[in-house]
Amino acid sequence: MGGEKKKNTVMETVVEEEPLSPCSRLFNSPDFNCAIIVTMGCRVKGNTPAIIDGLKRTLVNHPRFSSILEMNNGKKGKPCWVRTKVKVEDHVIVPEIDPKIENPDQYLEDYISKLTTIPMDLSKPLWEIHIIHLKTSNAESIALLKIHHSLGDGMSLMSLFLACTRKTSNLEALPTVAVQKKRFGPSCNSGFFNKIWWLFVGLWFIIRLLFNTFVDILMFALTIFLVRDTETPLLAKPGSEFNPKRFVHRIISFDDVKLVKNALKMTVNDVLLGVTEAGLSRYLSRRYDQEATPKLKESMRRIRLRSAIMINLRPNAGIEALADMMAKKSKCRWGNLFGYILLPFSVGLETDPLEYVRRAKATIDRKKHSLEAVFSMAFFKLILKVLGLKASVVLVRKVIHSTTLTFSNVVGPKEEITFHGHPLSYIAPCVFGHPHALTIHFQSYANKVIISVTADPTVIPDPHKMCDDLVESLKIIKSAVLERGLYEIEV
């Protein structure tokens, strides 16, 4: 980046090796070089020394963030992580910005877009933070944390990020993140007939699980060899992963999402998937430049549009364990371990906006009763072991090329947090480097949900309009709930 203050890296290498996991090797392949950018909107002006000091006490104490990647010099010539002494200042970049810049929001968008074209420096740990002293419409200053995806899966990296923060209301306390409590089966005090009933429920659950898994594995195999999504204005073109990406976001009310969730007795995931299906339907109908006629509805319903979603299969270490590990420089469970699921999206203009969320709930409920992610992970690991990295990359790329978008939703802190002395107004993470032209990510934060859209502008030239369609879809769904008197006050 022009005008950046950046010193040469000087590090002292310590001989301590750890082999790369299969998933990390996949993310480091030339044809699948993925990275994550977390945009942090700060409520105060950027204080570079405070951030550097905070990173020295937290992030660099994590093994992955203090290791360099050796592709051929590990044991038996295999790729490995090698621990090193890190000079934090070499990872902090502060660009020189004209204080009289006319459009700060556009400058930030252009800056991030250019950042997606710059490869990570393999001579040092694969992360960096850009501190942008620029007031935008939603923040007094911006911090951009760029992390190579080989360092960890999305859930682990988000947990690690949160472990580096503290509550704004209590600077000694870690953030709290909502955890969904699951319960299946009878209680210890259940009667005999109740236990018999639960036995039949368990048998039916196993039958459904096996059937759904079989169907999903079959569709996964067909996707690799035959089945491809319908050619739409959202489908990536060859080489899309190498194009600069545009990152745009919108902030919506979490209370609006919860209102719909409670009224229709669904989950937050159900509502956000329904909002996405409604937003994509609006966007596609406009791109097709057709009116909402019955003929258009039927033609859009025949579109095959799917997302290849990465599912984390490693138990999350938790914020407390990660914070303790960084403070004491101890060890903690870490790494990339994920499988893929193919999530179908139903698009088409509906007269009843609530139909989007009802349909989304049915889709998610079915996917919950499937071991598709486990089998896909085992399959790719087998291919990697038997046929090598190139064959594994070809298969992963084939699956992604045959689908339309990446979709994800990550639960964030319940309250506002501060990042090394910088209270945050929003957090907007997203990923790039994979062969999709469109990535939609939802991030909850306190009483907000941040919608992040990453788009290849050669395929999707108007990502701002797509964001607006998503926001408008939630408003329409919320209005339908209120008009029908379905609203329930959350206690």
Image (cartoon, rainbow, N blue to C red):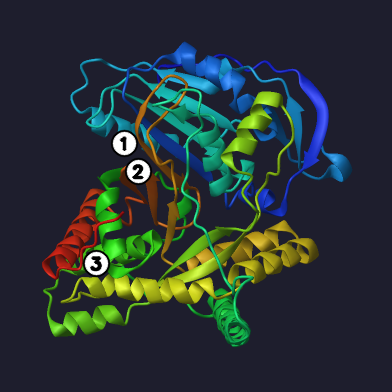
Check disc 3 and give the amino acid type: Leu
Q: Earlier in the sequence, mark 3 or mark 2?
A: 2
Residue 431 horizontal side relative to residue 296, left or right: right
> Residue at (48%, 32%) from the top-left corner?
145
- Establish if 341 lies above or below 156: below
- From the top left corner, tell me how far across and down residue 151 is, in percent: 63, 41
Residue density around tag 2, few if under 14, some if 14–19, many if 20 or more, within 10 Å: many
Quadrant of the drawing holding the C terminus = bottom left
Helix, strand or loop for disc 1:
helix
Amino acid of disc 1: Glu
**Mark 3 and mark 2: Cα distance apart in space:** 20 Å
Question: Where does label 2 land, which residue?
Answer: 247
Q: Which mark is residue 284?
A: 3
Residue type at tag 2: Phe
Return the disc, 3 or 1, that comes first in the chain's sequence.
Answer: 1
- Residues at circles 3 and 1 in contact by the CB criterion of under 8 Å: no
Q: Position of residue 98 (x, y in %)?
A: 27, 16
Q: Residue 133 versus residue 78: which sits nearer the camera?
A: 133
Mark 2, secondary structure of its residue? strand
Q: Residue at x 25, y 68 (%)?
A: 281
Residue, far top: 49
Given contact means CB atoms under 8 Å apart, are the residues at marks 2 and 1 in contact?
A: yes
Position of the N terminus, as image quadrant, is: top left
Residue on which disc 1 sits: 109
Pinpoint residue 237: horizontal percent, then vertical percent.
Answer: 41, 61
In the shown orientation, is residue 413 left or right of residue 282? right
